[in-house]
Image: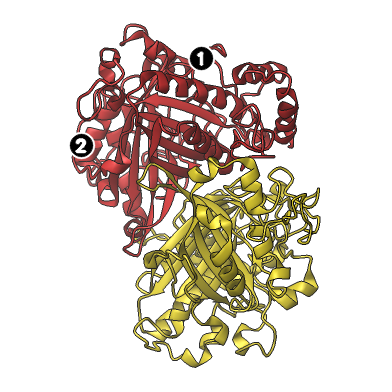
Chain colours: A red, B yellow
Amino acid sequence: MKRRKVLGWAGASAAGVAAAGAGALALARHDQNPASATTSEADAAGAIPFYGERQAGIVTAAQDRLHFCAFDVITDDKAALVDMLQNWTAAGARMTQGLDAGTFGAVGGSLEAPPDDTGEALGLPASGLTLTIGFGPTLFRDVRGKDRFGIAARRPAALADLPKFPRDTLEDAISGGDIGVQACAHDPQVAVHAIRNLARLGMGIVSVRWSQLGFGRTSSTSRSQATPRNLFGFKDGTRNLKSEDTGLLDEHLWVQPGDGPDWMTGGSYLVTRKIRMLVETWDRSPLAEQQMIIGRDKGEGAPLTGKLEHDEPDFAAQDGEGEPVIAVDSHLRLAHPDQNGGARLLRRGYNFVDGSDGLGRLNAGLFFMAYQRNAHKQFVPVQNSLAKQDTLNEYIRHVSSGLFACPPGMLAADDYWGRALFA
Amino acid sequence: MKRRKVLGWAGASAAGVAAAGAGALALARHDQNPASATTSEADAAGAIPFYGERQAGIVTAAQDRLHFCAFDVITDDKAALVDMLQNWTAAGARMTQGLDAGTFGAVGGSLEAPPDDTGEALGLPASGLTLTIGFGPTLFRDVRGKDRFGIAARRPAALADLPKFPRDTLEDAISGGDIGVQACAHDPQVAVHAIRNLARLGMGIVSVRWSQLGFGRTSSTSRSQATPRNLFGFKDGTRNLKSEDTGLLDEHLWVQPGDGPDWMTGGSYLVTRKIRMLVETWDRSPLAEQQMIIGRDKGEGAPLTGKLEHDEPDFAAQDGEGEPVIAVDSHLRLAHPDQNGGARLLRRGYNFVDGSDGLGRLNAGLFFMAYQRNAHKQFVPVQNSLAKQDTLNEYIRHVSSGLFACPPGMLAADDYWGRALFA
């Protein structure tokens, strides 16, 4: 448990001789101590590999806590941005393995310099931390239409801005962003520490546009996980894509060769939506109405035509009065792949409570995150259908939206986030 | 793990015959299954007794997660308020034992009625949940000077409004409150569920004035716990009062007979302060400066005159140039009991990150909570001293403040929160 600290001091001693490059050190730790990909609660201390064919944090069994941060790039200097991305990569490789952000660490450096780690995770294990990066549409052409970094031609068609959906009440200040970083961990202090250190390393290059904490993952990404509940009290993400669905993942999750520019092949597109839930109104609704709106029973989470959570819904079934048992405007029906040309998503959302709304109510809801091969063919049609017809709309408001192109993983320590895009 | 659900359905069946009172049921569960007071991570599923001489959640070994909520009472009807407090007590007795908020539960009631639990904690264990209630100055005489509930004469002198401190930048909308409820648990979903169900039960009687989520407890309240770190990366609360300090607790924590009105004897006063930390500025400070400001070293947390965290600081020690080793304006010196007439506190704060501040920075800091026998003799002089001289002030802003009179515990299931105050 004292790993960070011990290594911090060791690093300090070694520094007098020859400071190892951060990337090299991280790789060494990685080699010595092959990290386990298991993320069960029993293995909460475990480290998840940072390097790999895919970015970690997508099919990784969903951790319990989230800190998501969207950054604005505040420089037009491409070299400075690339330098920061290299520094971020080195720090990410270290922090995900339970190390301090920098070689010297929180307490091992010179007394006359700011520490190269902020220290609040000293003594805490890796806690299943993953860091997943994505690039937003405005990185390729900013709001003034300027191609600051000469990469406009590399913008994938799939990274076109999301359309405005019916009923959207988006707040610009908490939407969008040039770069998005998803930090997931079993310990919120570890996730916060990671984002905070990236922000620190990005000083002068990026600024925090918005950030969101989440708890109680609202989806499972592995068959080993039980389906969790959202703040409406219902199981959420029963039909989620799972890491075990390898064939489906190529079809629905991972960008395939020929889909667009090569730098995104093997990556995935992330849609974020902050969905405020009017829980006080929901809580006054009868159980039957709640179940009718969702299309499932609240306890087991079974379709109203079935008995068990994973039973297939029977959309043709009628009740004694000839009405569909699963209502035509129920969430289950409208979001179901059969009603959306087979579109499926890998959801990875979290519940949130951000204090109160100033009107006597909790500011609570779902921070929806979904990964997919092409948001315009998957999220967009589903959301259009939901936004137009879903009876759940009476109880929710979409207040923030984001779209990020998340490249594939890195295989070697000399690679860095965004290399194939910027090189 | 399925306890809630099983009991929910059992309750539903039993309801056809004769619904047991919520209080009685909770007491029965309590008797059958004596809850452990241990709150180690290994026992994260454990339930902490709701009834006892003291309210749980004060000397209880600090859990890892917080949801604090301050409510405004929006009625002048005393009977309605008392009725709500009785309902809250019954729900609190159940939820702290891992049960649904109401007898029927989230899914066991009539389909035609709103459920008497919101459901998002279905399947989750008690998770060390404690609920601690306190009454604010405005409950006794509201902002218009009105004694709505005929209890102004019962207001303790110790519940006088806190003075305005130098440098305070308080926001009224997130300060004060008629009633404060602290929900602590090992799982944020369980803490959020508890507050949300109290808000639901209080509909029309109270409204949410402000609420605050916290993670990474910043104090230990038991010698069995390691001292955690705040977002400045330093260990926080090294000298905190601990549950094992029984003699000191009577002197510094628990209201004694003769201190004021009887209804508060055995209780404690809670001060809350939301302290925004300007972490970006802090992160640019050299390690030596950070340590000088705090008065301790960052790694071990030892006073700058010592080697180990719990070494006594030597305030007289001088360096080679005749300067005090522990600076006169260091946080350690200014907050130390020896500099404050022996005043001590039982701190129970949490770190927070509330998104971003709209200026490109994380909105991060410490939600400070401290329990004490008399805030005007303990917190107030310490804070006056800190606000005037502490070099840490350059890096922090106090943006919210609250004071709550937390009565003693309840010994029997027919008691309720506030009975001795309102009866």
Residue name at image x 60 percent, y 74 percent: B381
Check the residue under mark 2 and report the chain it is in.
A
The answer to whether residue B238 is above or below residue A387 is: below
Residue name at image x 65 percent, y 64 percent: B334
Q: Which residue is mark 2?
A: A165
Q: Is residue A1 visible?
A: yes
**Quadrant holding the N terminus of chain A:** top right
Residue name at image x 71 percent, y 27 percent: A11
Res. A169 image quadrant: top left
Three-letter code for the amino acid on which mark 1 is drawn = Met
Res. B331 image quadrant: bottom right
**What secondary structure is marked by label 1?**
loop
Disc 1 + disc 2, Cβ < 8 Å: no
Earlier sequence position, callout 1 versus callout 2? 2
The Cα atoms of the two marked residues, 1 and 2, are separated by 35 Å
In the foreground, A185 or B311: B311
Three-letter code for the amino acid on which mark 2 is drawn = Phe
**Quadrant holding the C terminus of chain A:** top left
Q: Which residue is mark 1?
A: A410
Which disc, if any, is residue A120?
Answer: none
Q: Residue furthest front?
A: B321
In the foreground, B157 or B127: B157
Question: Residue B95's x, y, as percent?
Answer: 56, 61
Question: Residue B259's x, y, as percent?
Answer: 65, 87
The answer to whether residue A143 is above or below residue A171 is: above
Label 1, residues with CA under 10 Å away: few <14, some 14-19, many ≥20? many
